[in-house]
Amino acid sequence: MAGNDENIFLFVPNIIGYGRIILAIISFYFMPTNYTIAGICYIISGLLDAFDGHAARHFNQSTKFGAMLDQLTDRCGTMGLCVVLCYFYPKYMFWFQLSMVIDISCHWIFLHSSLLKGKSSHKFHDLNDNQIMAIYYSKPVLFTFCACNELFYASLYLLHFTEGPILFNMGLFKLIAYITAPVSILKTIISLIHGYVASINIAEVDKTERETAKSADLENLKFSDQTYVFYCSN
């Protein structure tokens, strides 16, 4: 039985998360010079993303801190890789910058709106009510999108050093980049949809809070008027 003194920071999935962060930092350090070490650390960090979720369910240690840690590690890992790609492919720097901005901002506002959702009685637009989004959030589809997105950026990174084995008269990494590029672009579009819906939800929270505040001010004004009338009548 879990006690009141349990340390959230030492939960198994969170310890795995710390390991992911350390591996990502090592990967960042070696990315400009040693693609072997960088690639191994980056891949292991990515693979551990699946294990921390299983650990959270197995040990009944799912926490908001763990969920945030997981999201931040994912986003920062991809961002770190994109920063290096800006250096390797300066001609396409703008597109890598745009990708990073969309990824970070849309995930941040969507997570923030999810927290606000539980604090507002106003109707929220739920992405899961949309059939397309319901399909997107199914585990096989979501995994495919995330994996292809990572493979796209990873293949561009590796292409800077080597084309890899030749398949169908084309280097393996270039072939992977061509195959995964459309999925990566589609994932970016879906991120924009998340950001749009989250913006609407937050605006609805603002509207509800402003209406509540106005109602409270009106009630206070009515009470003040009634009090004034009472004293004047006496």
Image (spheres, rainbow, N blue to C red):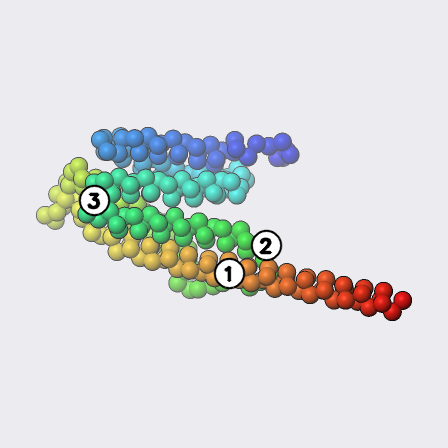
Would residue 101 be found to the left or right of residue 5 on screen?
left
Q: Earlier in the sequence, mark 1 or mark 2?
A: 2
Would residue 104 be found to the left or right of residue 56 on screen?
left
Give the secondary structure at mark 1: helix
Q: Residue at x 46, y 40 (%)?
A: 69
**Front-lying residue, 143 or 31:** 31
Residue 54 at x, y = what percent?
Answer: 46, 41
**Front-lying residue, 220 or 11:** 220
Would residue 85 be found to the left or right of residue 10 on screen?
left
The label on residue 119 is 2
Would residue 68 be found to the left or right of residue 232 on screen?
left
- Amino acid at dot 1: Ala
Query: Where does label 3 land, which residue?
Result: 90
Mark yes or no: residue 108 visible.
yes
Quarter location, residue 52: top left
Residue 192 at x, y = what percent?
Answer: 37, 57
Mark 1–mark 3 distance (CA, rounded to whole Å): 37 Å
Q: Nearer the viewer, mark 1 or mark 2?
A: 1
The label on residue 203 is 1
Task: Give the position of the C terminus as an image quadrant.
Answer: bottom right
Give the secondary structure at mark 3: helix
Residue 211 lies, with reference to residue 82, above or below; the image says below
Mark 1–mark 2 distance (CA, rounded to whole Å): 14 Å
- Amino acid at dot 3: Pro
Q: Residue at x 20, y 44 (%)?
A: 89
